[in-house]
Image (cartoon, rainbow, N blue to C red):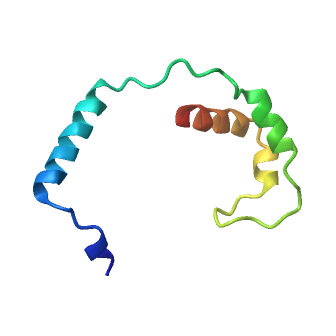
């Protein structure tokens, strides 16, 4: 059963790992040294290269949804930049 696989090795080890993570996470500030290799122009070129006339995916979006709405380029850019 899946719950058997997700059990802690021991409560003490779990607490040790959790406190170690919390200490490291409190000092984390992100990596501000990343180059700006993704910009809106790259997103626009990628969207323009999508195949048109294809069926929608599970999310219900087609390439045309993104291609014909210019504001989508900026939103996609912001999503990718926030992931990095």
Q: Nearer the viewer, residue 68 or 84?
A: 84
Residue 8 point in image, percent of width and height: 21, 62
Residue 52 is drawn in which quadrant?
bottom right
Residue 25 point in image, percent of width and height: 30, 32
Q: Residue furthest bottom?
A: 1
Residue at x 66%, y 21% (from the top left corner): 36
Q: Nearer the viewer, residue 81 or 20?
A: 20
Residue at x 66%, y 33% (from the top left corner): 77
Residue at x 31%, y 81% (from the top left corner): 1
Pick the quarter of the image with the C terminus. top right
Residue 21 point in image, percent of width and height: 26, 39
> Viewed as shown, does residue 61 lie left or right of 23?
right
Q: Residue furthest left?
A: 12
> Viewed as shown, does residue 41 lie left or right of 38?
right
Q: Is residue 54 above or below residue 30?
A: below
Residue at x 18%, y 40% (from the top left corner): 19
Residue 37 point in image, percent of width and height: 70, 25
Q: Is residue 45 above or below residue 64?
A: above
């Amino acid at each position: 059963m899946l719950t058997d696989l997700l059990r802690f090795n021991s409560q003490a080890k779990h607490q040790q790992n959790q406190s170690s993570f919390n200490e490291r996470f409190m000092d984390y500030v992100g990596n501000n040294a990343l180059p700006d290799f993704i910009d809106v122009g790259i997103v626009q070129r990628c969207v323009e290269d999508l195949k048109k006339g294809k069926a929608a995916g599970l999310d219900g979006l087609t390439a045309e949804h993104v291609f014909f709405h210019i504001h989508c380029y900026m939103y996609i850019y912001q999503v990718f930049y926030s992931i990095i």
